[in-house]
Image: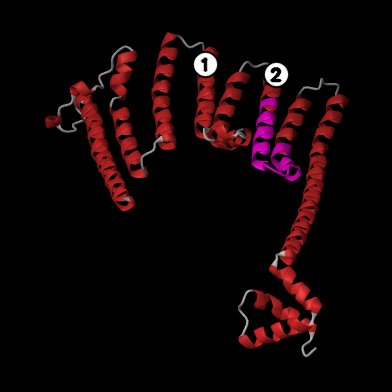
């Protein structure tokens, strides 16, 4: 054979991709007519055998590397957990040595559990680390609060627990809901489920606080009315953004108008459901008096009226832009 096989094999990838020079192409084709081994290699490259082999080898190397990394991180996590056990053991020994009941020992233990959930869990969990950290940290925090409450003989646990869960949910509930919503139908409603979960804990917090402070009828009337009024607006936002079929400009316009109306009418709605009536109401609107703070009722009414007017104006512009874009797209489709 005129050409060395190794030289031809180096040229085969370029030949297969048709990016080699005409001279190299002639060399390869001449050699393939004479060499059965190189011809077999060329055929394997053509039918993807070589590429599949390389892919399998690549995946094998990546999987082996992943297992090595997981093994190291798990070792680090276990070692960290062992270090965190040192103060727990020391407290246990000291607690027993001085003849005390195991009271503040459990506080230290639950505190170390909280630290471990933030430090150790990310090392020993392979998938969905954030979700598992949130769940374990929330559980450890609740145990710590419960232990402290029992130790101090307090009755504030449910107030603190519901407040912590609500605060954590406001930030991390989208990730947790996504983790549990495995089905296709549930995935399409993650936003609604997230909002419903947050609303549930907001009402639980209000109820627990009302019971804790011994709130009378005025507490329940004001807290539930104001909260429900605000929540309805949030729910409308979610429904419009998630399920609205119009373009983003129209959605933005509708939301701006809706927000302005909700804010502008808030005092009148509260006056309708809560007594005694306040002086803030749109019935006192008198733009001829401007925005003089001497007359508080007129000042507030004019401010709320301007909020409504500006929101309708801005929202109308955004909606108009959206309608224009829709018409333009329909013309292009035709």
Overall secondary structure of the magenta section: helix
Q: Which residues are magenta?
A: 116-143
Q: Which residue is mark 2?
A: 150
Percent x, y of residue 157 = 63, 20
Q: Residues within 10 Å of mark 2 (few under 14, many from 20)?
A: some
Decide if residue 229 is on the left or right side of residue 328.
right
Q: Is residue 108 above or below residue 12?
A: above
Percent x, y of residue 323 = 28, 43
Q: Nearer the viewer, residue 277 or 72?
A: 72
Residue drawn at x 77%, y 88% is 3
Percent x, y of residue 10 = 73, 79
Q: Is residue 333 above or below residue 295?
A: below
Q: Residue furthest front?
A: 33
Residue 85: in magenta span: no
- Give the foreground label among 1 and 2: 1
SS under mark 2:
helix
Work out which quarter of the rendered image holds the N terminus and state it.
bottom right
Residue drawn at x 43%, y 22% is 227
Q: Residue furthest left?
A: 288
Q: Which quarter of the picture shows residue 84? A: top right
- Residue 207 got which mark? 1
Percent x, y of residue 117 = 71, 37
Q: Nearer the viewer, residue 263 or 98?
A: 263
Q: Residues within 10 Å of mark 1 (few under 14, many from 20)?
A: some
Q: Which quarter of the picture shows residue 248? A: top left
Figure disc tally: 2
């Amino acid at each position: 054979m005129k050409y060395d096989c190794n030289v031809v094999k180096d040229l085969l990838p370029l030949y297969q991709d048709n990016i080699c020079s005409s001279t190299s192409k002639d060399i390869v084709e001449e050699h393939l007519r004479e060499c059965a081994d190189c011809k077999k290699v060329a055929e394997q490259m053509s039918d993807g055998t070589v590429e599949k082999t390389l892919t399998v080898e690549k995946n094998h190397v990546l999987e082996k590397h992943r297992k090595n990394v997981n093994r190291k991180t798990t070792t680090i996590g276990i070692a960290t957990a062992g270090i965190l056990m040192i103060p727990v053991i020391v407290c246990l020994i000291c607690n027993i040595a001085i003849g005390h009941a195991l009271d503040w020992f459990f506080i230290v233990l639950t505190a170390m559990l909280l630290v471990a959930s933030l430090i150790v869990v990310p090392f020993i969990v392979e998938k969905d680390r954030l979700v598992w950290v949130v769940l374990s940290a929330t559980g450890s925090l609740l145990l710590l609060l419960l232990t402290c409450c029992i130790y101090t003989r307090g009755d504030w646990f449910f107030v603190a627990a519901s407040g912590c869960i609500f605060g954590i949910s406001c930030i991390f509930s989208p990730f947790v809901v996504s983790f549990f919503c495995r089905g296709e139908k549930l995935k399409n409603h993650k936003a609604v489920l997230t909002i419903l979960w947050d609303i549930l804990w907001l009402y639980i917090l209000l109820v627990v606080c009302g019971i804790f402070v011994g709130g009378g009828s005025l507490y329940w009337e004001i807290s539930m009315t104001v909260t429900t009024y605000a929540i309805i607006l949030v729910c409308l936002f979610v429904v419009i953004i998630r399920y609205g079929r119009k373009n983003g400009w129209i959605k933005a316009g509708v939301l701006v108008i809706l927000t302005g109306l909700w804010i502008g009418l808030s005092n009148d709605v509260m006056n309708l459901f809560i007594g005694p009536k306040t002086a803030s109401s749109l019935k006192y609107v008198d733009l001829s008096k401007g925005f003089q703070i001497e007359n508080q009722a007129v000042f507030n009414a004019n401010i709320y009226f301007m909020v409504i007017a500006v929101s309708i104006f801005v929202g109308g512009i955004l909606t108009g832009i959206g309608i224009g874009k829709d018409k333009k797209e329909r013309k292009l489709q035709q």
